[in-house]
Amino acid sequence: MNDENFLREGERLDDLMRSGRKIIQDPREFCFSMDAVLIAHFPHFKKNSRVIDLGTGTGVIPLLIADNVREICAVELNSRAVDLARRNVELNGLTEKISVMEGDYRRHREIFKAETFDAAIANPPYTPLKNGEANKIFGIARARHEFTATLEDVVTAARYVLKFHGAFYMIHLASRLCEIVDALHRRQMEMKRLRMIHPKPNRDANLIMLEAVVGANAGNLKILPPLIVHNEDGSYTEEIFKIYNE
């Protein structure tokens, strides 16, 4: 089937520049950001891993990590995003490796068996809602705010589905690092790798990527060299180009 036959009105087809894969996106609603690409390149997966993507959106992270793992369960609450994710899996011939589940991972006890995945990955909503904000935020911006899932929700779900010594990978706001460490610790997960993301040289970090392990001892945290996104002139750094063109 021609790739264009997978498209519907208003959608576009983008090249993921990885293993010849493409992704259907709807610019009116769902387009993945650089955050998803960065966290997809951060994990150290074992080839036989069963991985769960908590809040997959249109399925970009599973498409990017599919070559590195045995099986991926991609969970998404939004039915429109689920439709796009399923078509993206089919478009790329990955239906035997990636399954897309429509569901709310906050109800993890109802839809998953406990401790059945080797790794979990998430690019969750970042920003807590303040009083009165809910009715002022529309469209794509809603995906960045904690309307449907909080930091506590995603960490709780990850712990429930992960095996002992399973790994949790997440990208989040650097300003919430203390909250993240506390949430992980209360659920028997300890951070083992951490990388700060800076928008430009000599600018404060705005994002972090982390790996936490279930049942690990506290300490021995490996803090990786910072990832700089843009040069001073606004162009992408060499490392960002390398990530996008692997």
Image: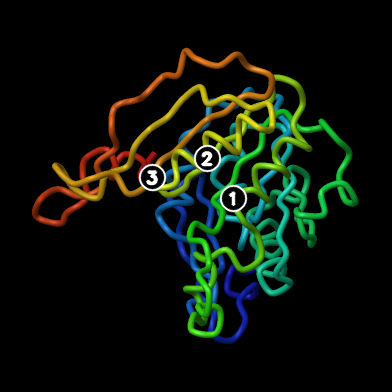
The quarter holding residue 164 reads top right
- Residue at mark 3: 174
Disc 2 crowd rating (10 Å Cα; few below 14, some 14-19, many 20+) is some
Which one is earlier in the sequence, the residue at label 3 or at label 2? 3
Three-letter code for the amino acid on which mark 2 is drawn: Ile
Q: Is residue 128 above or below residue 66?
A: below
Query: Residue type at mark 3?
Result: Ala
- How far apart are the two marked residues, 1 and 3, measured between alpha carbons? 13 Å
Residue type at mark 1 is Leu
Measuring from the top left, give residue 217's x and y in whole percent: 60, 13
Q: Residue furthest front?
A: 131
Q: Residues within 10 Å of mark 1 (few under 14, many from 20)?
A: some
Label 3 crowding class (10 Å Cα cut-off): few <14, some 14-19, many 20+?
A: some
- Nearest to the observer: residue 61 or residue 90: 61
Sequence-first tag of 1 and 3? 1
Q: Residue at x 44, y 46 (%)?
A: 176
Mark identifier at residue 151: 1
